[in-house]
Every structure is written in C-alpha cells, then in structure tokens.
Image: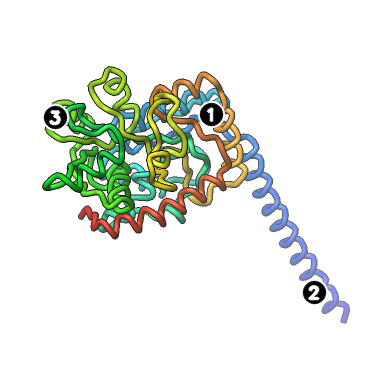
Amino acid sequence: MNKKSNSVNSARRSLLSTAGLTLIATLGGLLGMAHAQDAWPNKTIRLVVPFTPGGVTDTSGRLIAEYLGKRLGQPIIVDNKPGASGNIGTSLVKTAVPDGYTLVLGFDGTMVINPHVFAKTPFDTTTDFAPVGKIGDAILILVANPEVPVKSLSDVIALSKAQQGGLSFGTSGTGGTPHIAGELLKARTNANLTHVPYKGGGQAMTDVLGGTIPLVYTAVAGAYGHVQSGKLRAIAVSSARRATALPDVPTFIESGVPDFVVNSWVGILAPAKTPAAIVTRLNTELNAVLNDATVREKLRLMGIEATPGSAEQFNSEIKRDLARYGQVVKSAGIRIE
C-alpha cells in the first residue's frame, strides 16, 4: 500500500513539475514577445514602394519615411519593387514576417482597382494586410487644351454630345484612378467621352499640350504649372473641396455632379497579423508627421492633401473604394489580362 502511495505521489510530483515548467516556458515566451513589442522598433524598417523611383507615389513615400523614421528612432529604408501596376511589390509584403519591420506604400490603383481589372491579383486587399493609416489624397483634375471651345464641365458635356465621335480624354493608363474617374464621369453625366490610355502621365500631358487630344484627366501635381501658365484650361477637380493649390478651379460637385468625389490616395499598410500595439504606434507617429506644418506643405507641393486619421478609418475607406470601383470597372468592361 505504501509502495503504491509513494508511486502515486511521485507521479503527481512529476506531473506538477512538468506543468510548472510548461507554464514558466509559456509565460517566458509571452513576456519575451511583449518585451519585443515594447522594444519595437530596434532595427531598420523597410518600406516597400511598388513603383519606380521619381513618381509622386515614390516621392511622397520617401518624405514620410524620412520624418516617420525620426519619430520612431530608427531609419526607414525605401525599397522600390515595381511591376504589374504595383502588384509585385505589394505581394512581397503580403508574405513578409508581421513584425512591424516590413511595410508597404499602398496606392489606391493597386489596392482597390487592380483586384477588379486584373484577371488574377496575387493578394487579397482585405485579408492580407493591416491598414496603418492614409497619408493623403492626390487630387485629380480634368484639363483641356485651350483651343478646345470649353470653359466649364457643362461645356465639355455639351460639346461631347454635339461633336461627331465625342471627345477623347487621356490618362496615365488603363485601370488607373484617372481612368476610373473618367468612366464614372461618363456614366454619371451621359457625356460622350472616349478613353485614350497612355503608358504614363507624361506622354498624355505632352499630347494634350500639343493638341493631339482635347482632354486629360490627371493629378493636380502634373497639371499645376501648365494651368498656371495658361497652357491648359482647368475644368474641375474631383475632390470634395477645392484644391488649395488651385483655389479658383471648381469641384465637379460645384459643376453640377452631386457626390462626385474621386481622389487618388496613398497610405501605409503592414502584413496581416502585425501586432495591434505596433500598428497603433505606427498610426500615432504617422499622424504626428502628417500634422507637421513642414510635411503638410511638402505634400501639398506634390499635389497631396495630408489626411491624418485612424487605422480603422483607413480600413473603412479601402473597403468602400473596393466596392464602388468594382461597379465602375464592371460597367465599363475594363480588363487587364
């Protein structure tokens, strides 16, 4: 009996010892993870920009990386990974370790339009990423060659319906936000507009300046100097309010198209499952950067209006744009194989 009792007691002690070690190991691991998050960041952060250097998306990303890195106390290195309208670089971040050290510069064309226009997109915008925050809105503008007899949006619509073949509008390419905006404008006003895609905004701008095409839908940054010099005539901007850089140019809403707001936004996202504490810290510091007067002015000169806000707000906007742009893409039959 005593032998059996001793055996049972020994087994219990062994079980308790094992359980205790397991608990200690688990607590140690949790404490280690918590400490790692508390210590974040303690090394260089990589910001993947899924486009070539030099464009507005790239330059805005570099500006934010510089100032955000200063606030976090660690450098943020911009890593350009262009290809497939942003799909290649964005998909790289999808598979990165979700530890806060790899981020992606999200562009609306890539995040909410590509999933509809490409036959296959290598990521799911809503499940593969954790939105950190929106940097700002690049306001879009419709401009005309001065030789075209239009001064307002109503003139553009009337001329497109009266002129045989309608009016052509150029953009930086098929499936981009300006293209989507033009198709939405066409649907909302019944204007007879025909899209002319270019391989970049520069060539589209050259052709409208030369009179090869009558209209171009583009970002304010690309048209600002030409509008100021009188080489192009501004028709309207598709933001909720007038652009601070061009205060005399009306919005499409003021021009008679209710609720017509189409901006090209840029923001920061992390891989899905990035710890909430890290996302919150990133959002807090990003908003501090966006509220800096120097940064706001530098973004404004790029044609971007800073839009500090919560990660939840950014996530809601992403989902909203995914839904509404999907309808436009389907209606217009836009497709990239």
Q: Residue furthest bottom?
A: 1
How far across and how far down the image is residue 75, in percent? 49, 25
Numbered disc in front, either 3 or 1: 3
Cα distance, mark 2 to mark 3? 97 Å
The 10 Å Cα crowd at callout 3, few under 14, some 14 to 19, many 20 or more, is some
Q: How is the image coloured?
A: rainbow
Disc assigned to residue 276: none
Q: Which residue is found at the position 68% from the left and 48% from the top?
A: 28
Cα distance, mark 3 to mark 1? 39 Å
Asked whether the viewer can see residue 223, the reply is yes
Q: Is residue 216 above or below residue 225?
A: below
How far across and how far down the image is residue 266, in percent? 42, 38
Q: Which residue is found at the position 18% from the left and 42% from the top?
A: 168
Q: Which residue is found at the position 36% from the left and 48% from the top?
A: 91
Asked whether, in this view, residue 205 is left or right of residue 261, the answer is left
Disc assigned to residue 7: 2
How far across and how far down the image is residue 327, in percent? 35, 58
Counting residues from the N terminus, which is met first, the one under dot 2 or under dot 3? 2
Disc assigned to residue 290: 1
332 or 281: which is nearer to us? 332
Q: Is residue 91 above or below residue 4?
A: above
Q: Mark 3 sits on what residue?
A: 211
When asked about the image quadrant of residue 2, the answer is bottom right
Residue type at mark 3 is Gly
165 or 44: which is nearer to us? 165
290 or 81: which is nearer to us? 290
Asked if disc 2 and disc 3 are in contact, CB closer than 8 Å, the reply is no
For the image, the number of numbered tags is: 3
Q: Quadrant of the N terminus?
A: bottom right
When asked about the image quadrant of residue 156, the answer is top left
Residue type at mark 2 is Ser
Counting residues from the N terminus, which is met first, the one under dot 3 or under dot 1? 3
